[in-house]
Image (cartoon, coloured by chain):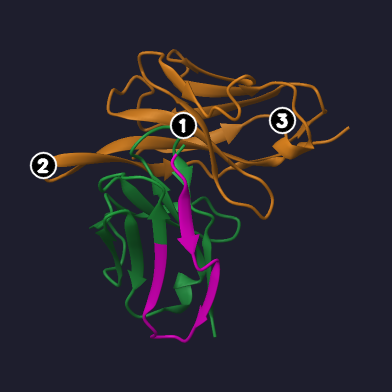
Chain colours: A green, B orange
């Protein structure tokens, strides 16, 4: 199985701050990396697929980059509605695997 | 617009079989562009992929659950189902069905869970 290691597990930032979440794959997954946002009591929502492609309807303050087996989700200016847990997920092979999640809160 | 809805018992006794159904509306389980998937999330924990079924009936399961999982589809009812046998308290979770869709990205493609059901809570307890 491909292991996805996500960091940090939680963070607290001020409104308007730039927030960065990192995900590392245990082996090469090309660009087959997706990011999801999960709010309490709701199903996860796809934000970014193929490492850097914004899903339709997702605000442009969200962006994704890749460097080898390292992937980054960035929120350029944190908004109140961004409070959530974020997960990375690889779709390079099965079993599909997720990172452990990063809980984002407002300071 | 495709929508998914899980249904099934919210309480299952230990050692019994958990059975859930995901009804697809606005689309077809016979689509060849995606896999129909089950994912679960134990309380306070992360997401775990259970497995998927393709329109052809081909299935793929998480090795950690493979001996206990069966995913099937009913094209006449436009739904797909999950059966998990010999459940224990560790199988208590929110169970989601989702569409694992192939998304084009320039010269290549990437699969992603673009549509999810709202999820259903399943508790294993006597």
Could you tell me residue A39's position as x and y percent? 53, 61
Tag 2 residue: B107
Is B19 situated left or right of A45 in this image?
Answer: right
Residue B37 is marked as: 1
Q: Residue furthest front?
A: A27
Task: Check the residue under mark 1 and report the chain it is in.
Answer: B
SS class, disc 1? strand
The magenta stretch is A2-22
Distance from label 3 to label 2 (Cα)? 44 Å
State the SS at label 3.
Answer: loop
Is A35 inside the magenta-drawn segment? no
Image coords of residue B81 (percent x, y): 55, 22
Q: Is residue B82 above or below residue A23?
A: above
Q: Please tell me in which quadrant of the rendered image residue B19 appears.
A: top right
Q: Which residue is mark 3?
A: B9
Which part of the image, by quadrant, shows the C terminus of chain A?
bottom right
Q: Using the image, name the chain to which the residue with label 2 belongs.
A: B
What residue appears at the point 36 percent right and 33 percent down from the top-left corner?
B26
The answer to whether dots 3 and 2 both sit on one chain is yes
């Amino acid at each position: 199985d491909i292991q996805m290691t996500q960091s940090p597990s939680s963070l607290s930032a001020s409104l308007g701050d730039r927030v960065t979440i990192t995900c590392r794959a245990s082996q090469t997954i090309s660009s087959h990396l997706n990011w999801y946002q999960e709010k309490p009591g709701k199903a996860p929502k796809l934000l970014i697929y193929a490492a850097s492609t914004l899903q339709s309807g997702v605000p442009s303050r969200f962006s994704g980059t890749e460097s080898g087996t390292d992937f980054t989700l960035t929120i350029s200016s944190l908004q109140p509605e961004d409070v959530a847990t974020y997960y990375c997920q690889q779709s390079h092979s099965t079993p599909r695997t997720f990172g452990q999640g990063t809980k984002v809160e407002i300071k | 617009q495709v929508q998914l809805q899980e249904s099934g018992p919210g309480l299952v006794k230990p050692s019994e079989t958990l059975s859930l159904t995901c009804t697809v509306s606005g689309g077809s389980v016979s689509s060849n562009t995606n896999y129909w998937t089950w994912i679960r999330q134990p309380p306070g924990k992360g997401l775990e992929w259970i497995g998927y079924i393709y329109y052809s009936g081909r299935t793929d399961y998480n090795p950690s659950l493979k001996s206990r999982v069966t995913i099937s589809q009913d094209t006449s009812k436009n739904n797909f189902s999950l059966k998990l046998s010999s459940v224990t308290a560790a199988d208590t979770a929110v169970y989601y069905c989702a569409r694992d869709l192939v998304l084009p990205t320039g010269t290549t493609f990437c699969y992603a869970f673009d549509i999810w059901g709202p999820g259903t809570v399943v508790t294993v307890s006597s």
